[in-house]
Amino acid sequence: MPTNSPLADDADAIIRVIEQNRIFGYSNKLGALTLADGRLWPMGPFPYQEAFHRSQKRNRWMVAGNRTGKTWCGAAELVMMAMQIHPWKRNFPPDNPWDFYAITTSHKKSLEVQRPLVEYYVPSSYIEHWYNREVEKPSRLILRNPNTGRRLGIIHFMCFEQNLMEFESSKLAGAWADEELPAEIYRALLVRLLDT
């Protein structure tokens, strides 16, 4: 591990990266992304995950078998977009923070799977506030650049159990669905994403 890595002082984080590499087969083909505060974010995907990240398509799906890295890839994509550090996508205008959705089947699954993965990728210094982080309720993560003080993005953790009206946002920039979406939620998201 490079000596300038923020993980060098954090044994638990080092173990997580080693475990991620071992279980999910992440290599270092992309190298490490450098965050605005100078920290390194180790993320090197499989070739099919890199193709997903590089794709300029507005609507992208990754369909694969169990334990192939779909969830890790989705979390990384969402966080790169929300933190405005995506190497292959345009960043959104800095006037107001944009909304992003992380959607799964239940609040329980969001709490057990999606939120820990997002937390894994987001440096704690970028977390302005995380509402309902540890409860089975809708949750919201507000990201702010610690160096500039500028708000970056807001990640809303949603589930299929919620009312359809709760999926409406006037400035939705991206959505990550960890499971196949019900048709009515999918249609509602498509309408919201057409503006971005």
Image (spheres, rainbow, N blue to C red):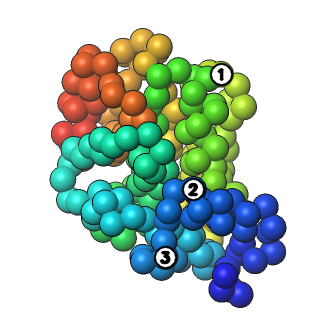
- Disc 1 secondary structure class: loop
| Residue bearing mark 2 | 23
Where in the figure is residue 176, as x and y percent of width and height? 39, 40
Asked if 43 appears above or below 138 in the picture, the reply is below
Q: Earlier in the sequence, mark 1 or mark 2?
A: 2
| Mark 1 touches mark 2? (CB < 8 Å) | no
Residue at screen point 23% across, 60% down: 55
- Could you tell me if residue 22 is visible in this image? yes
Q: Earlier in the sequence, mark 3 or mark 1?
A: 3
Where in the figure is residue 25, as x and y percent of width and height? 50, 62
Where in the figure is residue 43, as x and y percent of width and height? 51, 67
Residue 150 occupies quadrant: bottom right
Residue 136's disc number: 1
Residue at screen point 36% across, 15% down: 164
Q: Amino acid at mark 3?
A: Asn
Q: Quadrant of the N terminus?
A: bottom right
Q: CA distance from mark 3 to mark 2?
A: 14 Å
- Disc 2 secondary structure class: helix
- Could you classify mark 1 by the number of other residues whose Cα lies within 10 Å: few (under 14), some (14-19), or many (20 or more)? some
| Residue bearing mark 3 | 28
Task: Between label 3 and label 2, give the one nearer the viewer.
Answer: 2
Say whether residue 18 is left or right of residue 166.
right
Task: Between label 3 and label 1, give the one nearer the viewer.
Answer: 3
- Could you classify mark 3 by the number of other residues whose Cα lies within 10 Å: few (under 14), some (14-19), or many (20 or more)? few
Q: Amino acid at mark 2?
A: Ile
Q: Earlier in the sequence, mark 3 or mark 2?
A: 2
Q: CA distance from mark 3 to mark 1?
A: 35 Å
Residue at screen point 44% across, 31% down: 103
Residue at screen point 39% across, 30% down: 179
| Mark 3 touches mark 1? (CB < 8 Å) | no
Q: Amino acid at mark 1?
A: Glu
Say whether residue 190 is left or right of residue 133.
left
